[in-house]
Image (cartoon, helix red, strand yellow):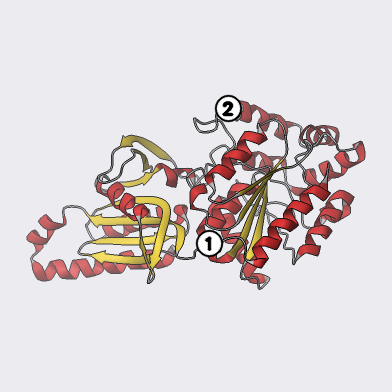
Amino acid sequence: MTHHVELPWENPPQARFFSRLASLGRLLLFDKRGTGMSDRVVGAPTLEARMDDIRAVMDAAGVERAVLGGLGDGGPLCALFAATYPERTTALVLINSGPRFVRSPELPWLPTRAEREREIEEVARRWGDREAAAEQFGRGSPSATEEERRGFARVMRLSVSPGSAAAYLRMNLDVDICDVLPLIRVPTLVMYRQTEPFDAVRTGRYLAEHIPGARLVELPGRDFAPQLGDPDRFFAELESFLKEVVEGEAWEAEPDRVLATVLFTDIVDSTARAAELGDRAWRQLLQKHHEAVRSQLGRFRGKEMDTAGDGFFASFDGPARAIHCAFAIREGIRELDLDVRAGLHSGECELVDGKAGGIAVHIGARVASLAEPGEVLVSSTVKDLVAGSGIEFEDRGEHHLKGIAEAWRLFSVLP
Protein backbone atom coordinates (compact mmCIF):
# COMPACT_ATOMS: atom_id res chain seq x y z
CA MET A 1 0.00 0.00 0.00
CA THR A 2 2.76 2.47 0.93
CA HIS A 3 5.82 3.19 -1.19
CA HIS A 4 7.83 6.18 -2.35
CA VAL A 5 10.49 5.84 -5.04
CA GLU A 6 12.75 8.40 -3.35
CA LEU A 7 12.24 8.29 0.43
CA PRO A 8 13.27 4.63 1.00
CA TRP A 9 16.82 5.53 -0.04
CA GLU A 10 16.95 7.79 3.03
CA ASN A 11 15.98 4.85 5.26
CA PRO A 12 19.12 2.67 5.76
CA PRO A 13 17.44 -0.79 6.00
CA GLN A 14 15.43 -0.16 2.83
CA ALA A 15 18.38 1.36 0.98
CA ARG A 16 20.56 -1.68 1.79
CA PHE A 17 17.78 -4.06 0.79
CA PHE A 18 17.09 -2.42 -2.58
CA SER A 19 20.81 -2.08 -3.33
CA ARG A 20 21.24 -5.78 -2.73
CA LEU A 21 18.25 -6.58 -4.95
CA ALA A 22 19.81 -4.43 -7.65
CA SER A 23 22.98 -6.51 -7.41
CA LEU A 24 20.99 -9.54 -8.66
CA GLY A 25 19.79 -7.79 -11.81
CA ARG A 26 18.15 -4.65 -13.08
CA LEU A 27 15.73 -3.36 -10.43
CA LEU A 28 12.56 -1.43 -11.32
CA LEU A 29 10.69 0.35 -8.53
CA PHE A 30 7.59 2.46 -9.02
CA ASP A 31 4.90 4.06 -6.92
CA LYS A 32 1.38 2.71 -7.03
CA ARG A 33 -0.99 5.04 -8.78
CA GLY A 34 -2.04 7.74 -6.32
CA THR A 35 0.83 7.14 -3.87
CA GLY A 36 4.42 8.28 -3.42
CA MET A 37 5.49 10.72 -6.11
CA SER A 38 2.67 9.85 -8.52
CA ASP A 39 -0.33 12.10 -9.08
CA ARG A 40 -3.12 11.74 -6.56
CA VAL A 41 -6.33 9.99 -7.65
CA VAL A 42 -9.80 9.60 -6.19
CA GLY A 43 -10.38 6.25 -4.51
CA ALA A 44 -8.17 3.23 -5.11
CA PRO A 45 -7.22 1.97 -8.58
CA THR A 46 -8.33 -1.55 -9.47
CA LEU A 47 -5.94 -4.46 -9.93
CA GLU A 48 -6.66 -4.16 -13.63
CA ALA A 49 -5.57 -0.51 -13.76
CA ARG A 50 -2.46 -1.30 -11.74
CA MET A 51 -1.57 -4.11 -14.15
CA ASP A 52 -1.66 -1.48 -16.89
CA ASP A 53 0.75 0.58 -14.78
CA ILE A 54 3.18 -2.36 -14.52
CA ARG A 55 3.16 -2.79 -18.30
CA ALA A 56 3.60 0.95 -18.80
CA VAL A 57 6.65 1.01 -16.52
CA MET A 58 8.15 -2.05 -18.21
CA ASP A 59 7.57 -0.54 -21.65
CA ALA A 60 9.09 2.79 -20.60
CA ALA A 61 12.15 0.99 -19.24
CA GLY A 62 12.47 -1.20 -22.33
CA VAL A 63 11.90 -4.39 -20.33
CA GLU A 64 10.15 -7.19 -22.21
CA ARG A 65 10.01 -9.70 -19.34
CA ALA A 66 10.59 -9.35 -15.61
CA VAL A 67 10.59 -11.19 -12.30
CA LEU A 68 7.66 -9.78 -10.34
CA GLY A 69 8.01 -9.45 -6.57
CA GLY A 70 4.89 -8.80 -4.50
CA LEU A 71 4.98 -8.06 -0.75
CA GLY A 72 1.74 -8.20 1.25
CA ASP A 73 -1.11 -6.65 -0.70
CA GLY A 74 1.16 -6.41 -3.74
CA GLY A 75 1.01 -10.20 -4.07
CA PRO A 76 -2.46 -10.49 -5.66
CA LEU A 77 -1.55 -7.81 -8.20
CA CYS A 78 1.65 -9.60 -9.25
CA ALA A 79 -0.06 -13.00 -9.31
CA LEU A 80 -2.86 -11.67 -11.50
CA PHE A 81 -0.32 -10.08 -13.84
CA ALA A 82 1.63 -13.34 -14.12
CA ALA A 83 -1.54 -15.26 -15.02
CA THR A 84 -2.70 -12.63 -17.52
CA TYR A 85 0.66 -11.85 -19.15
CA PRO A 86 2.86 -14.97 -18.81
CA GLU A 87 4.80 -13.87 -21.89
CA ARG A 88 6.00 -10.83 -19.93
CA THR A 89 6.67 -12.63 -16.64
CA THR A 90 9.95 -14.45 -16.10
CA ALA A 91 9.03 -15.57 -12.58
CA LEU A 92 6.83 -14.64 -9.62
CA VAL A 93 7.96 -14.05 -6.02
CA LEU A 94 5.30 -13.68 -3.32
CA ILE A 95 6.42 -12.47 0.12
CA ASN A 96 4.19 -12.54 3.21
CA SER A 97 1.17 -12.35 0.93
CA GLY A 98 -2.11 -14.12 0.30
CA PRO A 99 -4.88 -14.49 -2.30
CA ARG A 100 -7.37 -12.52 -0.18
CA PHE A 101 -7.37 -10.62 3.09
CA VAL A 102 -10.67 -11.42 4.82
CA ARG A 103 -12.08 -14.71 6.02
CA SER A 104 -13.74 -17.14 3.62
CA PRO A 105 -14.67 -20.84 3.66
CA GLU A 106 -11.34 -21.58 1.94
CA LEU A 107 -9.28 -19.43 4.35
CA PRO A 108 -11.17 -19.52 7.69
CA TRP A 109 -8.13 -18.40 9.69
CA LEU A 110 -8.10 -14.88 8.23
CA PRO A 111 -9.63 -11.92 10.12
CA THR A 112 -13.31 -11.22 9.49
CA ARG A 113 -14.42 -8.29 7.37
CA ALA A 114 -15.65 -6.52 10.50
CA GLU A 115 -12.25 -6.93 12.17
CA ARG A 116 -10.48 -5.56 9.10
CA GLU A 117 -12.87 -2.60 8.90
CA ARG A 118 -12.15 -1.68 12.51
CA GLU A 119 -8.42 -1.84 11.78
CA ILE A 120 -8.85 0.45 8.77
CA GLU A 121 -10.78 3.03 10.79
CA GLU A 122 -8.05 3.02 13.43
CA VAL A 123 -5.27 3.34 10.83
CA ALA A 124 -6.98 6.29 9.12
CA ARG A 125 -7.72 8.02 12.44
CA ARG A 126 -4.10 7.84 13.67
CA TRP A 127 -2.29 8.15 10.33
CA GLY A 128 -0.78 11.57 11.05
CA ASP A 129 0.50 10.54 14.49
CA ARG A 130 4.22 9.72 14.19
CA GLU A 131 4.28 7.69 17.37
CA ALA A 132 1.19 5.72 16.34
CA ALA A 133 2.69 4.98 12.91
CA ALA A 134 5.91 3.73 14.49
CA GLU A 135 3.91 1.59 16.90
CA GLN A 136 1.87 0.13 14.04
CA PHE A 137 4.99 -0.75 12.08
CA GLY A 138 6.53 -2.33 15.17
CA ARG A 139 3.56 -4.64 15.62
CA GLY A 140 4.18 -6.08 12.16
CA SER A 141 7.97 -6.18 12.47
CA PRO A 142 8.77 -6.71 16.16
CA SER A 143 12.55 -6.99 15.73
CA ALA A 144 12.80 -3.39 14.48
CA THR A 145 14.70 -0.97 16.71
CA GLU A 146 13.05 2.27 17.75
CA GLU A 147 15.08 4.13 15.12
CA GLU A 148 14.05 1.63 12.42
CA ARG A 149 10.40 1.88 13.42
CA ARG A 150 10.51 5.64 13.09
CA GLY A 151 12.35 5.44 9.76
CA PHE A 152 9.87 3.02 8.19
CA ALA A 153 6.91 4.89 9.68
CA ARG A 154 8.12 8.14 8.12
CA VAL A 155 8.20 6.56 4.66
CA MET A 156 4.72 5.11 5.24
CA ARG A 157 3.17 8.40 6.35
CA LEU A 158 4.73 10.45 3.55
CA SER A 159 3.85 7.90 0.86
CA VAL A 160 0.10 8.26 0.93
CA SER A 161 -2.62 10.40 2.51
CA PRO A 162 -4.89 9.01 5.25
CA GLY A 163 -7.87 8.91 2.88
CA SER A 164 -5.94 7.12 0.15
CA ALA A 165 -4.53 4.64 2.65
CA ALA A 166 -8.04 3.83 3.86
CA ALA A 167 -9.30 3.52 0.27
CA TYR A 168 -6.56 1.01 -0.61
CA LEU A 169 -7.22 -1.02 2.52
CA ARG A 170 -10.97 -1.06 1.89
CA MET A 171 -10.45 -2.17 -1.70
CA ASN A 172 -8.37 -5.08 -0.41
CA LEU A 173 -11.40 -6.33 1.52
CA ASP A 174 -12.97 -7.35 -1.80
CA VAL A 175 -9.84 -8.72 -3.50
CA ASP A 176 -9.98 -12.46 -4.15
CA ILE A 177 -7.68 -14.23 -6.60
CA CYS A 178 -8.17 -17.78 -5.28
CA ASP A 179 -9.56 -18.90 -8.65
CA VAL A 180 -6.56 -17.38 -10.43
CA LEU A 181 -3.85 -19.29 -8.54
CA PRO A 182 -4.14 -22.58 -10.53
CA LEU A 183 -3.82 -20.56 -13.75
CA ILE A 184 -0.34 -19.21 -12.96
CA ARG A 185 2.07 -20.84 -15.40
CA VAL A 186 5.40 -19.25 -14.47
CA PRO A 187 8.04 -20.32 -11.91
CA THR A 188 6.84 -19.15 -8.51
CA LEU A 189 8.53 -18.71 -5.13
CA VAL A 190 6.36 -18.26 -2.03
CA MET A 191 8.18 -16.94 1.05
CA TYR A 192 6.67 -16.16 4.40
CA ARG A 193 7.44 -15.52 8.04
CA GLN A 194 5.29 -16.12 11.10
CA THR A 195 3.80 -12.64 10.82
CA GLU A 196 0.80 -11.24 12.66
CA PRO A 197 -2.14 -10.72 12.68
CA PHE A 198 -2.98 -13.49 10.20
CA ASP A 199 -1.68 -17.06 10.15
CA ALA A 200 1.10 -16.69 7.57
CA VAL A 201 1.95 -20.39 7.71
CA ARG A 202 -1.40 -21.58 6.48
CA THR A 203 -1.75 -18.70 4.03
CA GLY A 204 1.68 -19.41 2.53
CA ARG A 205 0.90 -23.09 2.26
CA TYR A 206 -2.42 -22.31 0.60
CA LEU A 207 -0.63 -20.26 -2.05
CA ALA A 208 1.97 -22.93 -2.70
CA GLU A 209 -0.60 -25.72 -2.86
CA HIS A 210 -2.75 -23.91 -5.41
CA ILE A 211 -0.03 -22.46 -7.69
CA PRO A 212 1.30 -25.28 -9.90
CA GLY A 213 4.93 -26.09 -9.13
CA ALA A 214 5.39 -23.28 -6.59
CA ARG A 215 8.32 -23.48 -4.17
CA LEU A 216 7.48 -22.77 -0.52
CA VAL A 217 10.04 -21.31 1.91
CA GLU A 218 9.49 -20.42 5.56
CA LEU A 219 11.90 -17.71 6.67
CA PRO A 220 13.01 -17.35 10.29
CA GLY A 221 11.61 -14.56 12.42
CA ARG A 222 8.29 -12.76 12.70
CA ASP A 223 8.97 -9.56 10.73
CA PHE A 224 6.65 -8.63 7.91
CA ALA A 225 9.32 -6.36 6.39
CA PRO A 226 11.85 -8.58 4.55
CA GLN A 227 14.47 -5.85 5.06
CA LEU A 228 14.58 -6.74 8.75
CA GLY A 229 15.24 -9.91 10.71
CA ASP A 230 17.49 -12.19 8.67
CA PRO A 231 17.76 -10.70 5.16
CA ASP A 232 20.71 -13.01 4.37
CA ARG A 233 18.39 -16.03 4.44
CA PHE A 234 15.90 -14.16 2.26
CA PHE A 235 18.53 -13.40 -0.35
CA ALA A 236 19.98 -16.90 -0.24
CA GLU A 237 16.58 -18.38 -1.10
CA LEU A 238 15.88 -15.74 -3.73
CA GLU A 239 19.25 -16.17 -5.44
CA SER A 240 18.87 -19.97 -5.48
CA PHE A 241 15.42 -19.66 -7.06
CA LEU A 242 16.53 -17.12 -9.68
CA LYS A 243 19.56 -19.26 -10.55
CA GLU A 244 17.26 -22.15 -11.41
CA VAL A 245 15.05 -19.86 -13.46
CA VAL A 246 17.98 -18.42 -15.41
CA GLU A 247 19.53 -21.83 -16.02
CA GLY A 248 16.26 -23.16 -17.30
CA GLU A 249 15.73 -25.78 -14.61
CA ALA A 250 12.35 -24.30 -13.74
CA TRP A 251 9.54 -24.79 -16.24
CA GLU A 252 8.92 -22.21 -18.93
CA ALA A 253 5.89 -19.99 -19.25
CA GLU A 254 3.11 -21.05 -21.55
CA PRO A 255 2.06 -17.93 -23.52
CA ASP A 256 -0.58 -20.00 -25.30
CA ARG A 257 -2.44 -20.39 -21.99
CA VAL A 258 -3.47 -17.11 -20.37
CA LEU A 259 -5.99 -15.67 -17.96
CA ALA A 260 -8.59 -13.76 -19.95
CA THR A 261 -12.14 -12.48 -19.63
CA VAL A 262 -14.50 -13.72 -22.32
CA LEU A 263 -17.62 -11.84 -23.38
CA PHE A 264 -20.57 -13.28 -25.28
CA THR A 265 -23.42 -11.15 -26.61
CA ASP A 266 -26.45 -11.88 -28.75
CA ILE A 267 -29.47 -9.97 -29.94
CA VAL A 268 -32.71 -10.60 -28.07
CA ASP A 269 -35.57 -12.05 -30.20
CA SER A 270 -33.47 -11.80 -33.36
CA THR A 271 -35.52 -14.39 -35.27
CA ALA A 272 -38.79 -12.56 -34.71
CA ARG A 273 -37.18 -9.23 -35.62
CA ALA A 274 -35.70 -10.68 -38.83
CA ALA A 275 -39.10 -12.05 -39.85
CA GLU A 276 -40.69 -8.68 -39.15
CA LEU A 277 -38.17 -6.68 -41.21
CA GLY A 278 -37.48 -9.06 -44.06
CA ASP A 279 -34.13 -10.37 -45.25
CA ARG A 280 -32.72 -7.20 -46.84
CA ALA A 281 -33.63 -4.80 -44.03
CA TRP A 282 -32.45 -7.32 -41.44
CA ARG A 283 -29.05 -7.67 -43.14
CA GLN A 284 -28.64 -3.91 -43.13
CA LEU A 285 -29.59 -3.67 -39.47
CA LEU A 286 -27.29 -6.56 -38.61
CA GLN A 287 -24.42 -4.79 -40.36
CA LYS A 288 -25.01 -1.67 -38.24
CA HIS A 289 -25.09 -3.91 -35.15
CA HIS A 290 -21.75 -5.44 -36.07
CA GLU A 291 -20.20 -2.03 -36.68
CA ALA A 292 -21.45 -0.78 -33.31
CA VAL A 293 -20.10 -3.82 -31.45
CA ARG A 294 -16.71 -3.67 -33.16
CA SER A 295 -16.44 0.03 -32.39
CA GLN A 296 -16.85 -0.67 -28.67
CA LEU A 297 -14.46 -3.63 -28.77
CA GLY A 298 -11.81 -1.32 -30.19
CA ARG A 299 -12.54 1.30 -27.56
CA PHE A 300 -12.13 -1.16 -24.67
CA ARG A 301 -9.24 -3.23 -26.09
CA GLY A 302 -11.38 -6.28 -26.73
CA LYS A 303 -10.34 -8.88 -29.30
CA GLU A 304 -13.02 -10.26 -31.56
CA MET A 305 -12.78 -14.04 -31.48
CA ASP A 306 -15.84 -15.04 -33.49
CA THR A 307 -19.08 -13.75 -34.95
CA ALA A 308 -21.94 -16.10 -35.59
CA GLY A 309 -25.17 -14.62 -36.92
CA ASP A 310 -26.25 -12.02 -34.38
CA GLY A 311 -23.78 -12.97 -31.63
CA PHE A 312 -20.25 -11.87 -30.76
CA PHE A 313 -17.51 -13.63 -28.83
CA ALA A 314 -14.60 -11.46 -27.64
CA SER A 315 -11.77 -11.66 -25.12
CA PHE A 316 -10.23 -9.03 -22.84
CA ASP A 317 -7.13 -8.79 -20.67
CA GLY A 318 -9.14 -7.12 -17.90
CA PRO A 319 -12.61 -7.92 -16.49
CA ALA A 320 -13.60 -4.32 -15.68
CA ARG A 321 -12.93 -3.29 -19.28
CA ALA A 322 -15.03 -6.21 -20.45
CA ILE A 323 -17.95 -5.19 -18.23
CA HIS A 324 -17.78 -1.56 -19.37
CA CYS A 325 -17.63 -2.75 -22.97
CA ALA A 326 -20.72 -4.92 -22.49
CA PHE A 327 -22.68 -1.94 -21.15
CA ALA A 328 -21.44 0.31 -23.97
CA ILE A 329 -22.53 -2.31 -26.51
CA ARG A 330 -25.94 -2.57 -24.86
CA GLU A 331 -26.48 1.20 -24.94
CA GLY A 332 -25.19 1.53 -28.50
CA ILE A 333 -27.41 -1.26 -29.77
CA ARG A 334 -30.48 0.28 -28.17
CA GLU A 335 -30.03 3.24 -30.51
CA LEU A 336 -30.75 0.74 -33.30
CA ASP A 337 -33.94 -0.31 -31.50
CA LEU A 338 -32.31 -3.63 -30.58
CA ASP A 339 -31.59 -5.24 -27.24
CA VAL A 340 -28.80 -7.63 -26.29
CA ARG A 341 -27.94 -9.98 -23.46
CA ALA A 342 -24.34 -10.45 -22.35
CA GLY A 343 -22.40 -12.94 -20.28
CA LEU A 344 -18.82 -12.79 -18.96
CA HIS A 345 -16.38 -15.17 -17.29
CA SER A 346 -12.69 -14.92 -16.39
CA GLY A 347 -10.56 -18.04 -16.62
CA GLU A 348 -7.70 -19.78 -18.36
CA CYS A 349 -7.98 -19.73 -22.13
CA GLU A 350 -5.98 -21.71 -24.65
CA LEU A 351 -4.79 -19.62 -27.57
CA VAL A 352 -4.66 -21.46 -30.88
CA ASP A 353 -3.90 -19.36 -33.96
CA GLY A 354 -4.98 -16.30 -32.00
CA LYS A 355 -8.35 -17.80 -31.05
CA ALA A 356 -9.37 -18.44 -27.43
CA GLY A 357 -10.71 -21.82 -26.41
CA GLY A 358 -11.03 -24.10 -23.40
CA ILE A 359 -13.43 -24.59 -20.53
CA ALA A 360 -13.46 -20.86 -19.65
CA VAL A 361 -14.99 -20.12 -23.04
CA HIS A 362 -17.69 -22.74 -22.51
CA ILE A 363 -18.51 -21.28 -19.09
CA GLY A 364 -18.75 -17.78 -20.57
CA ALA A 365 -21.16 -18.99 -23.23
CA ARG A 366 -23.32 -20.76 -20.63
CA VAL A 367 -23.40 -17.64 -18.45
CA ALA A 368 -24.57 -15.58 -21.44
CA SER A 369 -27.34 -18.07 -22.17
CA LEU A 370 -28.82 -17.41 -18.71
CA ALA A 371 -28.80 -13.61 -19.03
CA GLU A 372 -32.12 -11.81 -19.26
CA PRO A 373 -32.81 -9.31 -22.10
CA GLY A 374 -30.64 -6.25 -21.51
CA GLU A 375 -28.75 -7.92 -18.66
CA VAL A 376 -24.98 -8.19 -18.19
CA LEU A 377 -24.43 -11.40 -16.23
CA VAL A 378 -21.04 -12.42 -14.83
CA SER A 379 -19.47 -15.32 -12.97
CA SER A 380 -18.21 -14.97 -9.40
CA THR A 381 -14.62 -14.92 -10.72
CA VAL A 382 -15.30 -11.75 -12.69
CA LYS A 383 -16.89 -10.11 -9.66
CA ASP A 384 -13.91 -10.98 -7.43
CA LEU A 385 -11.41 -9.46 -9.85
CA VAL A 386 -12.96 -6.00 -10.15
CA ALA A 387 -12.57 -4.92 -6.51
CA GLY A 388 -12.31 -1.15 -6.23
CA SER A 389 -13.89 -0.51 -9.64
CA GLY A 390 -17.13 0.86 -8.21
CA ILE A 391 -19.08 -1.71 -10.23
CA GLU A 392 -22.02 -3.06 -8.24
CA PHE A 393 -23.65 -6.47 -8.50
CA GLU A 394 -26.83 -8.30 -7.57
CA ASP A 395 -26.48 -11.92 -6.54
CA ARG A 396 -28.34 -14.25 -8.91
CA GLY A 397 -27.54 -17.38 -6.87
CA GLU A 398 -25.88 -20.65 -7.83
CA HIS A 399 -26.54 -22.20 -11.22
CA HIS A 400 -25.68 -25.53 -12.79
CA LEU A 401 -24.32 -24.69 -16.22
CA LYS A 402 -24.96 -27.15 -19.01
CA GLY A 403 -21.94 -29.40 -19.54
CA ILE A 404 -20.07 -27.95 -16.51
CA ALA A 405 -19.60 -30.20 -13.48
CA GLU A 406 -19.55 -27.68 -10.63
CA ALA A 407 -22.19 -25.06 -9.85
CA TRP A 408 -21.32 -21.40 -10.41
CA ARG A 409 -22.59 -18.37 -8.52
CA LEU A 410 -23.66 -15.68 -10.97
CA PHE A 411 -24.12 -11.93 -10.51
CA SER A 412 -26.07 -9.35 -12.47
CA VAL A 413 -24.17 -6.11 -13.03
CA LEU A 414 -26.19 -3.14 -11.83
CA PRO A 415 -26.48 -0.11 -14.15
Residue 333: x %, y % from top left: 28, 59
Query: As drawn, is 378 to the left or to the right of 152?
Result: left
Q: Earlier in the sequence, mark 1 or mark 2?
A: 1
Residue that appears at 48% across and 52% down: 183
| Percent coordinates x, y for residue 145 in the rendering | 90, 37
Mark sitting on residue 142: none
For disc 1, the neighbor class at 10 Å (few under 14, some 14 to 19, many from 20) is many
Q: Which residue is mark 1?
A: 85
Which residue is found at the position 27% from the left and 45% from the top? 371
Q: Nearer the viewer, residue 254 or 137?
A: 254
Up-down relation of residue 85 to residue 192 (above or below): below
Q: Which residue is at 33% across, 35% downward? A: 398
Q: Residues within 10 Å of mark 2 (few under 14, many from 20)?
A: some
Is residue 382 positioned above or below 314 on the image? above
State the residue position of label 2.
112
Camera-nearest label, 1 or 2: 1
Q: Where residue 395 appears, x then y in whole percent?
A: 37, 35
